[in-house]
């Protein structure tokens, strides 16, 4: 739960402080754009690398490495005096959290196999809380202290993650030592440890990656472009910023609902279609009538974020083993974030090229179609182990 709370704070705390960072560190338009690209780029890279780390070192060691990177990067960038060290240390933070993104679903499957839904509900909800709370506190804390304290203080939450996991790691080692076998403690690889999984052979893995890419692309567009779009339509800057905060907060109720509701459904695509309809209503409303019913359209789009909670849940619903969960988590998040990360840039570039928002909003429609294509592929109850398994050589 604490790990989930910390996963987005270091990302969302920076944008509200960019004004101060530009003056003190020398951020330009180019380096600001690079800063915005680091989270999806590093999340994608380490999404693909983390299953290898998990297979070699185990879930717990991978998680501890993720936290160490996050803490070191956050503390380091809070003390730097130049833009490029700040960017480099931000990359270290995002590498840590890229690993953290991947290890959470298989950790849930390993330690809470009979309570996947409720534990997923808890951690996805806290993920949304962390995303929403750090930008709200960023400016007040910076005003009372400095931007360095405002950015660096979130390392304390990341550090707190180490304490229970070090205790758990020591306890698992003691159990292995006492029993003389790994069977006494939960196995990092799970029942599928005798098999190598090739996720690119699995329609489920591709489906989840496509689904996550379509979903995350829409979310990234809203976090990047909702305030400037509304401001350009005549909404004052403060209200536009509040609309984005409201959009983020709406992720909380759906994050809590989805893992408790969707596992009971024979066809998850029914719930996904409902959330997709919310997305579509929000997109159309904001394009056709941004000033009349603004809050209604943002409400619909915000409720559409239930698709993200569904994606994280499906990692465990479409895998049989902890190893399968880690491979599916890494593959889907790696490709999903890579695909989604470029969409906000394209969204803005299309607007600059055409002078209007029509084609840009049409791009959101394409993202919806991509998402629903992935939803069809993951709807049937089948598992990554069914098509991706390759027996390990003896």
Image (cartoon, grey):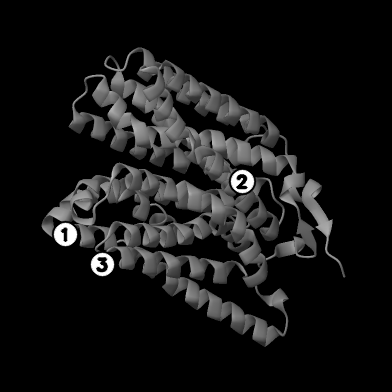
- Quarter location, residue 232: top left
Q: Which of the 4 quarters of the picture holds residue 146?
A: bottom left
- Image coords of residue 143 (percent x, y): 13, 53
Q: Disc 2 designates what residue?
A: 332
Disc 2, SS: helix
Q: Is residue 26 left or right of residue 223?
A: left
Q: Residue at x 55, y 24 (%)?
A: 366
Q: Are marks 3 and 1 in contact (CB under 8 Å)?
A: no
Report how far apart the C-alphas of labels 1 and 2 lie in the structure: 38 Å
Which label number is shown at residue 315?
Answer: none
Q: Where is residue 312 in the image (x, y as percent from the top left)?
A: 55, 46
Q: In this view, does 126 lie to the left or right of 118?
A: left
Quadrant that contains the C terminus: bottom right
Q: Label 3, label 2: how many angstroms apart (C-alpha)?
A: 35 Å
Q: Nearer the viewer, mark 3 or mark 2?
A: 3
The residue singled out by tag 1 in the image is 146
Residue 61 in the image, given as x and y percentages of width and height = 56, 72
Q: Please tell me whether mark 1 sits on a helix, a strand or a loop.
A: loop
Instruction: Decide which of tag 3 and tag 2 comes sooner along the chain.
Output: 3
| Dot 3 or dot 1, earlier in sequence | 3
Q: In this view, does 125 lie above or below 154?
A: above
Q: Quadrant of the N terminus?
A: bottom left
Q: Measure the alpha-carbon separation of dots 3 and 1.
A: 11 Å
**Taking the image as drawn, is residue 335 in sight?**
yes
Name the residue rendered at 54%, 44% in the picture.
Answer: 338
């Amino acid at each position: 739960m604490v790990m989930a709370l910390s996963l987005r704070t270091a990302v969302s705390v920076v944008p509200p402080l960019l004004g101060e960072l530009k003056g003190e560190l020398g951020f330009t338009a180019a380096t600001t754009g690079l800063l915005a690209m680091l989270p999806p780029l590093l999340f994608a890279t380490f999404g693909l690398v983390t299953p290898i780390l998990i297979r070699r070192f185990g879930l717990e060691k991978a998680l501890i490495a993720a936290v160490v990177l996050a803490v070191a990067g956050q503390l380091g960038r809070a003390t730097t005096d130049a833009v490029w060290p700040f960017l480099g240390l931000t990359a270290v933070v995002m590498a840590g959290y890229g690993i953290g993104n991947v290890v959470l679903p298989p950790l849930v499957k390993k330690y809470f196999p009979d309570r996947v839904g409720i534990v997923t509900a808890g951690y996805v909800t806290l993920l949304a809380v962390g995303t929403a709370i750090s930008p709200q506190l960023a400016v007040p804390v910076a005003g009372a202290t400095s931007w360095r304290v405002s950015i660096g203080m979130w390392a304390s939450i990341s550090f707190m993650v180490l304490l229970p996991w070090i205790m758990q790691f020591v306890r698992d080692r003691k159990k292995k030592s006492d029993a003389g076998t790994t069977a006494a403690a939960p196995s990092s690889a799970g029942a599928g440890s005798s098999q190598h999984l090739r996720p690119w052979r699995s329609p489920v893995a591709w489906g989840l990656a496509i689904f996550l890419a379509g979903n995350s692309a829409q979310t990234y567009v809203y976090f990047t472009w909702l305030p400037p779009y509304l401001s350009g339509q005549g909404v004052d800057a403060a209200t536009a910023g509040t609309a984005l905060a409201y959009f983020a907060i709406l992720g909380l109720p759906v994050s809590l609902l989805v893992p408790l509701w969707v596992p009971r459904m024979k066809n998850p695509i029914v719930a996904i279609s409902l959330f997709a309809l919310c997305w579509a209503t929000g997109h159309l409303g904001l394009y056709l009538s941004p000033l009349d019913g603004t809050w209604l359209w943002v409400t619909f789009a915000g409720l559409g974020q239930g698709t993200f909670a569904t994606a994280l849940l499906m990692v465990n619903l479409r895998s049989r083993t902890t190893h399968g969960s880690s491979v599916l988590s890494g593959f889907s998040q790696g490709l999903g974030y890579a695909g989604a990360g470029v969409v906000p840039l394209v969204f803005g570039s299309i607007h600059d090229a055409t002078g209007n928002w029509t084609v840009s909003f049409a791009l959101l429609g394409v993202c919806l179609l991509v998402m629903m294509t992935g939803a069809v592929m993951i709807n049937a109850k089948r598992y990554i182990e069914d098509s991706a398994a390759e027996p390990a050589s003896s």
